């Protein structure tokens, strides 16, 4: 379950916390300068733990999206080999330009 999907509850002694028990990540040793930089950039209401949690969530989402992109590319290549239907880069770019132009026209009407 992702952080955005977790419901929060309020406990007077512990503040706002996830309602489900979370898994622990291993402790990570970093250079003192890295920790100092991290502490320097976190917000006033943020903790180092929440910063690390968000970094793990963001990086995981990025890598999952990258893997899904690669999987779609592999699937598309396999389909092209099986059907013999290939598209030129010029064709694909012109299709994308049409999509962008349509979206821009729609946005301009708002």
Image: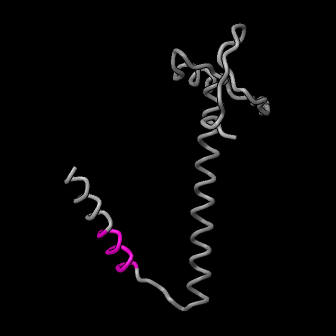
Residue 84 is covered by the magenta coloring: no
Look at 32% across and 66% down and name the residue there: 99
Q: In which quarter of the image is residue 80?
A: bottom right
Q: Is residue 14 above or below residue 18?
A: above
Residue 73 place in picture, x, y as percent: 57, 71
Residue 2 place in picture, x, y as percent: 66, 39
Question: According to the image, what is the colour scheme of the structure?
Answer: one colour
Q: Is residue 16 above or below residue 93?
A: above
Q: Quadrant of residue 58?
A: top right
Q: Nearer the viewer, residue 19 or 93?
A: 19
User: Start and end of the magenta stretch?
Assistant: 89-98
Look at 77% across and 31% down and name the residue there: 22
Quarter of the image containing the N terminus? top right
Q: Is residue 50 above or below residue 1?
A: above
Residue 71 horizontal side relative to residue 21, left or right: left
Residue 84 place in picture, x, y as percent: 54, 92
């Amino acid at each position: 379950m992702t952080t955005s999907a977790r419901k929060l509850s309020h406990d007077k002694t512990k503040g706002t916390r996830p309602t489900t028990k979370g898994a622990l990540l291993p402790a990570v040793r970093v250079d003192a300068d890295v920790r100092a930089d991290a502490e320097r950039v976190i917000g006033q209401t943020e903790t180092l733990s929440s910063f690390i949690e968000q970094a793990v969530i963001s990086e995981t989402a990025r890598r999952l999206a990258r893997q899904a992109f690669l999987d779609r590319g592999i699937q598309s290549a396999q389909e092209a080999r099986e059907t013999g239907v290939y598209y030129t880069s010029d064709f694909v770019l012109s299709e994308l330009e049409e999509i962008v132009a349509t979206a821009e026209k729609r946005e301009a009407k708002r």
